[in-house]
Image (cartoon, helix red, strand yellow):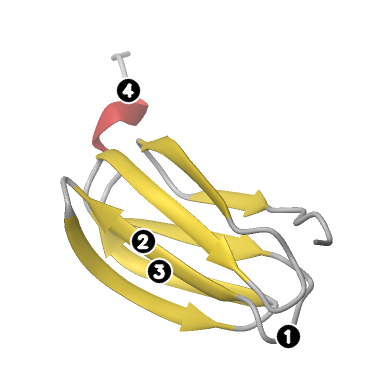
Amino acid sequence: MGVVSNEALCPCLLKVNTGIAGAQVRLSRGGTDLGAQSGGEVLFQGLEAGEYTLRVEAAEYQPFEFQLQLRNNRELTVYLLKR
């Protein structure tokens, strides 16, 4: 018998769903840009546990940015508002 902590489950995957084919999804950590991907569904791999900033932009939509804590694999759905 033992204790298992989910704090140590990284490197992690972050899957972001926008449903907008031309969406640009950018991930950064501590002011360092970790990269951007385009598409309605994007995947960032090999991420360490910690706090990240996610920014999503698409033509005809308002940009959206938020902070997230990553401790294990995570899937997010982001809904953008029309301009």
For mark 2, give the secondary structure: strand
The label on residue 21 is: 1
- In the image, which is nearer the foreground, mark 1 or mark 3? 1
Identified by mark 1, the residue type is: Ala
Q: Which residue is mark 3?
A: 44
Kindly report which numbered mark, 2 or 3, lies closer to the viewer in this rendering: 2
Q: What amino acid does circle 3 point to? A: Phe
- Examine the image and state in which quarter residue 50 appears: top left
Check contact, mark 2 vs mark 4: CB within 8 A. no
Residue carrying label 2: 27
Residue 60: where, in percent of width, then height? Answer: 77, 74
- Give the number of callouts: 4
Q: CA distance from mark 1 to mark 2?
A: 18 Å
Q: Kindly identify which residue carries mark 4.
A: 4
Q: Secondary structure at mark 3?
A: strand
Q: Which numbered disc, 2 or 4, marks the residue that appears first in the sequence?
A: 4
